[in-house]
Amino acid sequence: MAQSHREYAEQRWKMMTPHDVKLVSSRGWEFVLRDVGIAGIREFTNVKCLHTHYAHYLATGNNLIGEWVQQLLDSAATERTKEPK
């Protein structure tokens, strides 16, 4: 889980243009945009918004919490499509 947070923050930082980095640095926002994880999480062992982990999983295929959400959704869909007894 911590790795997903680190990768998310790293990818976000890499997407910024040199102009973006200059602006962010001038406003003192480096930490937030460079080092904070999914859904603004600073402590990488915590889970906040499941939908953000799920979105990260859909985008990368690499987020354990998002994968669990997908499994629960798949399970719920299977249960709904079963024939009534």
Image (cartoon, rainbow, N blue to C red):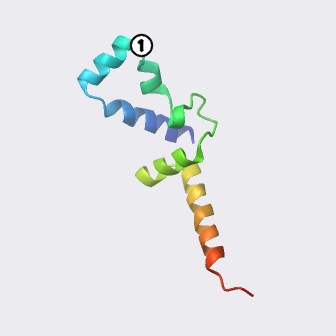
Residue farthest along the right direction in this orientation: 85
Q: Amino acid at mark 1?
A: Gly
Give x and y (percent) for residue 81: 61, 79
Q: How many marks?
A: 1
Question: Which residue occupies 25% across, 28% down?
Answer: 17
Give x and y (percent) for residue 2: 56, 37
Question: Which residue occupies 55% across, 56% down?
Answer: 67
Question: Which residue occupies 66% across, 86% down?
Answer: 83
Left or right relative to 56: residue 1: right
Residue 29 falls in image quadrant: top left
Q: Is residue 74 above or below residue 26?
A: below
Label 1: state its secondary structure.
Answer: loop
Residue 23 falls in image quadrant: top left
Give x and y (percent) for residue 1: 57, 42
Q: From the image, which quarter does the C terminus lie in?
A: bottom right
Left or right relative to 34: residue 39: right
Q: Is residue 80 above or below residue 43?
A: below
Q: Residues within 10 Å of mark 1 (few under 14, many from 20)?
A: few
Question: Which residue occupies 52% across, 45% down?
Answer: 52
Observer-nearest residue: 35 or 51?
Answer: 51
Residue designated by label 1:
28
Give x and y (percent) for residue 62: 48, 50
